[in-house]
Image (tube, rainbow, N blue to C red):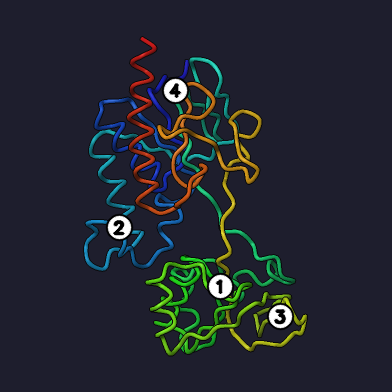
Amino acid sequence: MAHLYDTIIIGGGPAGLSAGLYAARSRMDVLLLERAKYGGQATTTDELENYPGSIEDCTGTTLSERMRKQAEEFGCKFAKDEVVEVKLEGDVKVVTGKKETYEAKTIIIATGANPRLSGFKNELELRGKGVSYCATCDADFFTDLDVAVIGGGDSAITEAIYLTKFAEHVTVIHRRDALRAAKSLQEKAFANPKISFIWDSYVDEALGDEIMEGLVVRNKFTNETSVLKVDGCFVFVGYDPISSLFEGQVAMDDSKYIITDDDMRTNIPGVFAAGDIRVKSLRQVITAAADGAIASTIAEHYIESCK
């Protein structure tokens, strides 16, 4: 018979790690399952200057590791396993991984989201050969070279500014005539002499065979195309929730984000969702961490109410 945990957390990003910390501090018997590296999308962020109280030069990786250690110090258990099936109805929730099967009284879903593809020709063929979705991971490969950034939101502009530390020049390509990023980020980008902008345009195709040589850029109003000679292209056009595992069981919106109330409850009793996986207006490390804390606290209340 499988060990029955108080709660199992699926996902080890900021939401999952925060949930693990709060659950462990409440003396809950908690297991966190993560298939890859702890920290999730946060580990792709070079600077976390907007996380309250973070140390100077704090990175997503260092903050995530500190979160993991804190949770571990209070008794949170960790396992590296990829979840392939979940059964969420009933008093005992069953989580099946590639390695083992786990059981719990409550589940906290914190699987996060993946970067969305832009959709231009050769995007997948040249992924890792000039096309990237993580500036922190790949910026140093483009030292003294010209690169492009696709997107106009916070992530795109943050990474464009970061890339100027390495690249000779950064060209931001945006479908609109104005950025969607926070005003403070816009001001930094417009003031940076290494950043230029191509407005009202999108990428048709990445050129090159074994390595990217340029981009075919199309103006959405005139339909005219031009070739932008760049050695790299960084795509930041949003994210897709990692929620397919829970389809048909947990209520979702049209974009497949999990619907919760303010206390992170899903439509299934004893099942909660936290972080980027759920419907919300702001997806940041701080909101993910807050979600995790709430989810664990309400999960504890749920268990107490069932006694």
The three-letter code of the residue at mark 3 reads: Asn
* Mark 2 residue crowding within 10 angstroms, few (<14) / some (14–19) / many (20+): some
Q: Which residue is mark 1?
A: 234
User: In the rendered structure, which disc, 2 or 3, sits on the residue that comes first in sequence?
Assistant: 2
Q: CA distance from mark 2 to mark 4?
A: 32 Å
Q: CA distance from mark 1 to mark 3?
A: 19 Å
Q: Mark 2 vs mark 3: give the one in front.
A: 3
> Which of 300/78 is in front?
300
Query: Which secondary structure lies at badge 1?
Result: strand
Say which residue appears at 64% left-offset and 62% top-offset: 117
Q: Which mark, residue 219?
A: 3
Q: Which residue is mark 2?
A: 51
Q: Mark 4 vs mark 3: give the one in front.
A: 3
Residue farthest top in this picture: 307
User: In the rendered structure, which disc, 4 or 1, sits on the residue that comes first in sequence?
Assistant: 4
Q: CA distance from mark 2 to mark 3?
A: 37 Å
